[in-house]
Image (cartoon, helix red, strand yellow):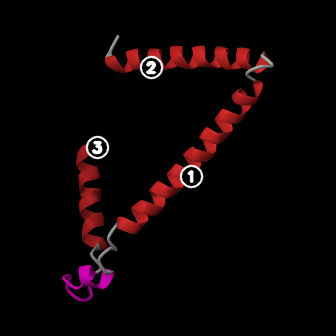
Amino acid sequence: MNKDQSYGGLIFAVSAIVFVLYILALTSAYWRPWVLGVPVVLAVLGVLGITAWIGYTMLTTPPPAPLEAEMGSQPSGSSGTSSTSSSSSSKTDEKH
């Protein structure tokens, strides 16, 4: 068994144990408020954390270079797509 399968088995076993413990805790009157409240709080914090991460990434990522500057190096009248498509089709023909 390789390392990935070992990790998969470990993740499966831990999730199965947590699942059984969660179901048992739901039936207990003492733990019921905590069993219902903690996952909701964790879910809200997770969504807010992901949202904050996306915002931070958008804030710190530099803007892309203007498209005109990239296309300025090509000769006028050449779209650049015809040479790419012909070379990719010749590569496809070589494989078959």
Kindly identify which residue carries mark 3. 96
| Between discs 3 and 1, the one toward the N terminus | 1
Distance in Å between CA atoms under marks 3 and 1: 51 Å
Judge whether 64 appears above or below 41 on screen.
Answer: below
Residue 31 badge: none
Say which amino acid is labelled 1. Leu
Which secondary structure, mark 3?
Answer: loop
- Give the x, y percent position of residue 55: 47, 62
Residue at the image point whose x is 51% and y is 51% from the top? 50
| Between discs 1 and 2, the one toward the N terminus | 2
Kindly identify which residue carries mark 1. 48
Residue at the image point whose x is 65% and y is 15% from the top? 21
Q: Residues within 10 Å of mark 3 (few under 14, many from 20)?
A: few
Quarter-wise, where is residue 46 in the image? top right
- Give the x, y percent position of residue 58: 42, 65
Front label number (3 vs 2): 2
Judge whether 54 appears above or below 35 on screen.
Answer: below
